[in-house]
Amino acid sequence: MLDTLHRPLRDLRLSLTDRCNFRCRYCMPVEVFGPGYQFLPREEILTFDELVRTVRASVELGVKKIRLTGGEPLMRRGVKDLVTMISAVPGVEDLAITTNGILLNHQAEGLAAAGLDRVTVSLDALDEEIFARMNGVGAKVDRVLLGIKTARLHGLPVKVNMVVQRGVNEQEILPMIRWTRENGVTLRFIEYMDVGASNGWKMEEVVTAKEIVEIVTSEFPAKPVAATYPGEVAKRWTFADGEGEFGVISSVTQPFCGDCSRLRISAEGKAFTCLFASEGADLRAALRNADDDVEVLDFLRGLWGARKDRYSEERGLISRTKAEMSYLGG
């Protein structure tokens, strides 16, 4: 299944909830997502059956990889059962979850047993003060590190994502590299992105991929390596001493729209063909009105077939209202 720019559909990201137990400033700043904020009512969120139907239809169109996101996906009750259901769908080759890790220690064993293949943990600092300031709720970094350790003990490979924002946490780049090297965890740096409108994004706050690589290699020499599969979003480097690798996701300064193969489904069932899209198509209506999966399959086929998004390549040339990061799951 190809879009108008001949990009295949290979990756499906399912947001399980719009709720999160963090208030990270680049994603869900407390000034916007405070105590009075109205999250989606339960009846508007896709059910597990609807999520699995979406997976089945997507696999028919070429999807191989499924990622569960949020909000914070581990806040969705029964997520282990959903993992069991999705992992049983023929054609799903990779099932992952992206989490802030604060609940991972208690759920890792069940997720591994249910068929989860791997975990990505969002961790933006090791320094307690910086981490507490960034997560907005005073959460302790040790709880996240324990979750990572527990996941690995139960056989789940772990990657760590670090959003780097100038003036906020760029001083944590080298400490994070040291920690991940010592603990056998792969680190991905992410340029601070202009997703949504609530984070007050400014270009001058972006620590570029080039700068990040220069900081890392000032202490740990490394060389770039080729992508392992089409559409891989992180540019990777391996350390000269053979002790692992790191990567940088550079959608601001080095866009990769030409290889993008991702379809995102919000918790309420809106289908987005780009992280920076203004609106999503109403997949939930198709799911709830359809007599069988054929109509859902036709809906997704038509949506992807008409896709022409390449926002990151056009950044600065167009202006649009964009959905929030917490709504789309990144």
Image: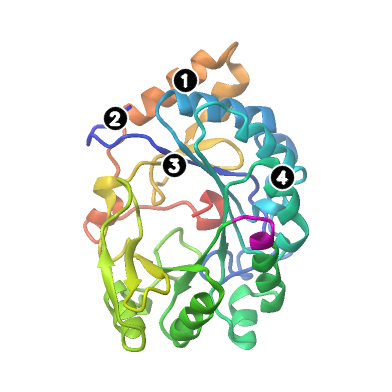
What secondary structure is marked by label 2?
loop
The circle drawn on residue 297 is: 1
Q: Is residue 172 above or below residue 156?
A: below
Mark closer to the observer (2, 3): 2
* Disc 2 target residue: 2
Q: Is residue 309 above or below residue 216?
A: above
The circle drawn on residue 279 is: 3
Q: Residue placed at 60% from the left, 11% from the top?
A: 291
The answer to which of marks 2 and 3 sits earlier in the sequence is 2
Inspect this view and state whether residue 205 appears.
yes
Decide: marks 4, 1 in contact (CB < 8 A)? Answer: no
Inspect this view and state whether residue 191 appears.
no
Q: Residue placed at 27% from the left, 54% from the top?
A: 256
The N terminus: image quadrant: top left
Mark closer to the observer (4, 1): 4
Q: Nearer the viewer, residue 78 or 219?
A: 219
Query: Residue 171's spot in the image, x, y percent?
Result: 45, 88
Amino acid type assigned to the residue bearing label 1 in the image:
Leu
- Disc 2/disc 3 C-alpha distance (Å): 21 Å
Query: Residue 70's spot in the image, x, y percent?
Result: 60, 51
- Disc 4/disc 3 C-alpha distance (Å): 36 Å
The answer to which of marks 2 and 4 sits earlier in the sequence is 2
